[in-house]
Image (cartoon, coloured by chain):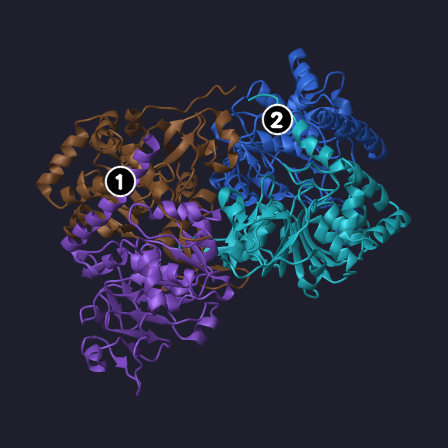
Chain colours: A purple, B blue, C brown, D cyan
Amino acid sequence: MACRISEEMREEGERVTVLGSFTPLAYAAYMLAKLTHAPDAWLAGYNAIGMDPIELGFSGAEAAIYKTARGRWSFTESNQLVHIGTRGMIECVSSVQLGGDGAINLSVIGDYDRPKVRLPGGAGSPEVVQNYHTVVAYFSRHDRRTFVPRVDFATGRRTPVGAGAREKRGLLPGPVIAISPLAVLRKDTDDEPFSLASVHPGVSVEEVVDNTGFELAVPDRVPVTRAPTEPQLRVLRERIDPFATARFDFLGGRERVAFLREILTREWDRARALVEAARS
Amino acid sequence: MACRISEEMREEGERVTVLGSFTPLAYAAYMLAKLTHAPDAWLAGYNAIGMDPIELGFSGAEAAIYKTARGRWSFTESNQLVHIGTRGMIECVSSVQLGGDGAINLSVIGDYDRPKVRLPGGAGSPEVVQNYHTVVAYFSRHDRRTFVPRVDFATGRRTPVGAGAREKRGLLPGPVIAISPLAVLRKDTDDEPFSLASVHPGVSVEEVVDNTGFELAVPDRVPVTRAPTEPQLRVLRERIDPFATARFDFLGGRERVAFLREILTREWDRARALVEAARS
Amino acid sequence: MSIRSKTVALSELPALVPERATVALGGAWFANHPMAAVRELVRAGRTDVSGIALLGSIDVDLLVGAGALADLTFSMVTMEAMGMAANFRRAVQSGELAITEVSAISLQLALEAAGRGVPFLPLAGPEGSDLVPLHPEVYGRASTSFGDEDVPAVRAIRPDVAIVHASRCDELGNAQFDGTYGQDPELARAASRVIVTCEEIVSGERIAESAELTRIPGFLVDAVVEAPFGAHPCSHVPRYAMDAWELLDYQEAASDPEAFARYLDRVRGETEDEYRARAVSGDRGQVLSALVEAATVLER
Amino acid sequence: MSIRSKTVALSELPALVPERATVALGGAWFANHPMAAVRELVRAGRTDVSGIALLGSIDVDLLVGAGALADLTFSMVTMEAMGMAANFRRAVQSGELAITEVSAISLQLALEAAGRGVPFLPLAGPEGSDLVPLHPEVYGRASTSFGDEDVPAVRAIRPDVAIVHASRCDELGNAQFDGTYGQDPELARAASRVIVTCEEIVSGERIAESAELTRIPGFLVDAVVEAPFGAHPCSHVPRYAMDAWELLDYQEAASDPEAFARYLDRVRGETEDEYRARAVSGDRGQVLSALVEAATVLER
């Protein structure tokens, strides 16, 4: 999935991609793009702008971002220059639901005022999914509870979606792409439903359609999602994400915490060794 | 005059005074206040904020301001935080004309579209004379061509002037003060004309009224402007302004350039000596 | 030369937060929240604070869990990879905590407007969100004499108090941040009263030596508090990384009412100095710093 | 790692300024105007530039005197203690130069609006000025759904080109300013095309070592030009102070048509390298730096 996301990242127009909430899969995709096909893509995170690729980790990601910055700016500057303007490249968002209209939900399951589950909230995604060039919503599962005709609450919704209507309003044209463990869906217009862009190797079109709660346009020939190349996988596993943090996005509660403790033990040991080394 | 201006500078409310265009008399007044009665007053200049007092000079003032800053900010930050807000303390402006309504003219003598004299323009003064707590307009001469019923062009005009009306609109209350070689005038309300606050030692009330082109309210007892104290003069002459740059404001064209060359020779020699010293 | 010092002890901080005040907290995600101040508010037994959190985590969750918040304006509260913020989630689901959810960018612009002294700011982007019709007091429209019609706009939000954590600060309040500072400068501009906690209080000369690191000029600041490790268990990069181990312990406690009651009792039963001696004991501080050192840039 | 370099020679700069382009010039008063670029535009014999100058001095006056400007938007053009800007004054009085006079703060906000991608920004303060009714295309009023009525507002001004002078820059355009940078970052945000001249082009690693000095991120920049003493005779603090002696010579020349024709001939007859060899010859550069060193702070 990281490889597929990274394909959406381009250098055109010197747009900026911002690392926001901790979404290791998206981080990995950005680093992969920067280390392979998009070395001059602009990345920003926290108060750093113009960062180089970093090794992913849990407790050190912020520090790595800090260390590689070519400039520091305030959140207000990145708001003004990227988020509310036309300089945003790609927004990867891990959402709980995707609506047939492209809406994402990071707020609640159930009724907004009496929620069954109160989710974290959308941070900057409402403006960002509207203003950036490309929106990639990614999901750790593909089922009818996730891909729904209408989300319980639209934390953010790209509107309009169609390129012509967007350009007329001074918005960047660009698609809403959904990437799941089964397939890649894509929405380019306002009148048409999401269409099935590709199915992952070994997945049938039927399986995708059955597990999608909203209407899906299926072209006559559905391509198979490009498999990651050997070099891509090597860069990802050996350099970008040796701790395999991208797995976070696919683990549930207890399993995830256990995995996190495992990673943290390795991070602690590495830091501890530095302290010992300095001492001797 | 510098001493009289410096009296208007206070520390109340942590407001900021900004050094803008090169107005040595105002600079001297600010430094005097900071070295005497208002040590915690906030000064800003160029991209420096929180500066300490500096020695005045011509070619080195910007560098001195740079060196003493406790922070650097952009002009946009100072705009947002001081100029268009309610954090401005005192604005000293050297204007060509003062109107009976308090308007200042830094744009043209004569008709705006076919000016007899095109002046430099007002920089940020239009917003600043409106938003700051205190406006001090100072003049190198006091005559009916300078103090006029209506200025040829109001580059800036405080409106309203009255404290009540200002507070109702969320503006800082505070007077418009005019300081000339003869007297101190003051405007506190919208309905009343400027009043004569004090006459300088040796100047008669009559002389002031005769040389003022707009209506002037003269109280029964007109005080004499406080003379500068010996310590004030010593600080000014020996520490703040050893080159006597404040004289600039009282010299005309050729005389001023000749005086400037004189100061510059001394500044050059001092810098040159540093170069020689570094060499040996 | 200065005659006025703004330094106060951490124990005096709660008294600087008026009753029912809206309080904006600095930091973002697990970075640089003013945790020493949060703990001190919890110790003071506050129950009346109206919180504003742009991107909250343990700061908000702890305040909610301690019952310190009367209500909350926020864009996100999350424990990131550790899971959802348990106290926050529980309090909202039960209806106990009144919330105003505003997207981060609109909320920041609302604070920016207050800092600039303007009643609103125009922007682009929120229109597709269901948050917009929910909060017409924040999200609106503007039109101008230039012919602009129906431009999205947010209304100024002026917090009564902002609390942020800096790297160093002089006694006049000039606050420097060596690394991550989030939107802390914007909070300082927006709020009526600004409290800066910092790793260390230094002289004005020291500040002048690195003036480019000053993100909050002192004229905006009302009180300065020295609080070493004042962001712990959050990060203060580049001085120390987040203490993810402590955060995980917190997260486990927050998921269980009894464990959380014990957690609260312990925080309330100790001073901040005692907290620091306990939570950053031995060479733990050095390890948290080494985590910053260990963070790896792949290529330049 | 980067594959794309934005560096160009100064001689290529005029070709990057399209015909009739609106060009915003960096710097303020005698500080840090992009004078090498100004001279190069003069050498190219331009007559079509639509200038935008926030706080102009010799930059504007030289362009006006050389006939390079078709019109000018400005808040102030002054030679400060040296007197009025002679060419500017003469050209406006004769009606030769069309002007749009806007107060500095409103003009900066108009540029800021463009940089933020919003059509206007609200402010406070210009209402008493006679400039307001003169320019309804810049000064207007806004109202909102929150009940705001008649809030003063300025309309976005987007220059086609911004030219600023930085201390150092990498080949991707990350531009650092050690000292005075005026409103240069705002110009870079506002303009469709951004040209940075700089004292020296350095590696990205060098920029990353002092990231807090980067005021213009490279993604805003289109071209990078190395131009040592590129602000001369204006200052580039803390590297060099203004060359007040050269400025006085300029001022004397500008006050006399024949002398000014000779001044122009000389600038046009030499390359920028030759200008530098002539105008900053011997140890003059060292003296201009020593003026910075000599500047005196009275007390801390």
Kindly identify the residue that appears in the image at 31 percent across and 86 percent down: A221
Q: Is residue D61 left or right of residue D182?
A: right
Q: Which residue is mark 1?
A: C243
Residue A211 location, x and y as percent?
19, 75
Q: Nearer the viewer, residue B30 or D188?
A: D188
Residue D73 location, x and y as percent?
68, 54
Q: Is residue C64 left or right of residue A171?
A: left
Secondary structure under badge 2?
helix
Residue A208 location, x and y as percent?
22, 77
Question: How many other residues sit within 10 Å of disc 2, few (<14), some (14-19) or many (≥20)?
Answer: many
Q: Amino acid at mark 1?
A: Asp
Q: Which residue is mark 2?
A: B30
Q: Amino acid at mark 2?
A: Tyr
Which quarter shows the N terminus of chain A?
A: bottom left
Residue C67 location, x and y as percent?
18, 39
Secondary structure under badge 1?
loop
Chain letter, disc 1 residue? C
